Amino acid sequence: MHGPVTVGWLLVALCAATGVSFLLRTRGAPPARRGAAGSEALMGFGMAAMALPGAAAVPLPPVVFVVLFGAAAAWELVLALEARGARHGAAHHLHHAVGCLAMVYMALAMTMTQTPHGSTGHHGGMAASAGLPLLTGALLAYFGVYVLRAGARLMPPGVTADGLALGSPGTGHAPRTRPVRDQPVRDQPVRETAVRETAVRDLPGLALACRLAMGTGMFAMLLTL
């Protein structure tokens, strides 16, 4: 992708961190969840590779991205058809398919800006306009709406209009507390380590926050076309 170098490296860091997060979520997960997390990890790492700026860009021909994410999009569409009875499952796979097709589109747009010698035809870090404006605009609208909806879902459910959470000082409601029970000392360090690792991996909202980050990264990459 093309654009300011600083923005490119920020996108690389964001997408790579998201890919690592989803890769960690595959550990000890059931098959269905492991497959979904693996697909999202592939998307994160693929976006990071495509966003590498300038001389640091991965020397892969765009056709590699086209074949890889074209196959991923086809697989997600098959999974969406199989999960059409489950509304949220089908929608999740369709979103993955749209993301994969967006990667295919951006890879094809990269071929349109290449010179016969294989380098991109741009100067000073800015690329010539590539892609179809109508399709680019439709994808920008899709990912823009997705980012706004994901951000709204990350808002704490108990936040009031004045910014105070229910149960916080000033609301008149005291937070509920649960009694702390004594835990056996034996094997407690091992148990605490396992619980801590699982708690970090399955932190509420972490997966949605990573998807929000990927949606934001996709929006930014489409802006460079």
Image: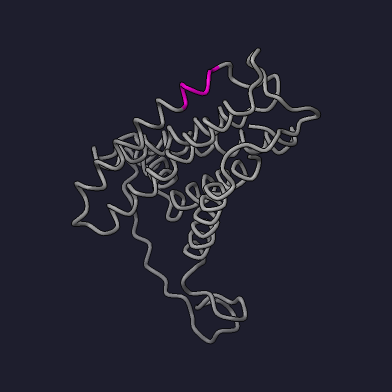
Q: Position of residue 87 (x, y in %)?
A: 26, 59
Q: Where is residue 213 in the image (x, y as percent from the top left)?
A: 54, 47
Please give the range of residues in magenta. Answer: 60-65
Compared to residue 165, the image places residue 39 above or below, namely above
Outermost residue on the bottom side: it is: 172
- Residue occupying the point 53% across, 34% down: 47
The answer to which quarter of the image holds residue 180 is: bottom left
Q: In front here: 86 or 108?
A: 108
Outermost residue on the right side: it is: 124
Q: In front here: 51 or 194?
A: 51
- Residue occupying the point 50% across, 78% down: 166
Q: In this view, does 122 lie to the left or right of 142?
A: right
- Residue occupying the point 56% across, 33% down: 109
Compared to residue 163, the image places residue 103 above or below, namely above
Q: Is residue 62 magenta?
A: yes
What's the magenta bit mostly, secondary-structure-wise? Answer: helix
Q: In this view, does 123 lie to the left or right of 225?
A: right
Q: Where is residue 131 in the image (x, y as percent from the top left)?
A: 58, 39
Outermost residue on the top side: it is: 117
The answer to which quarter of the image holds residue 49 is: top right
Quadrant holding the N terminus: top right
Q: Does the magenta stretch include residue 104?
A: no
Quadrant holding the C terminus: top right
- Residue occupying the point 54% across, 35% down: 106
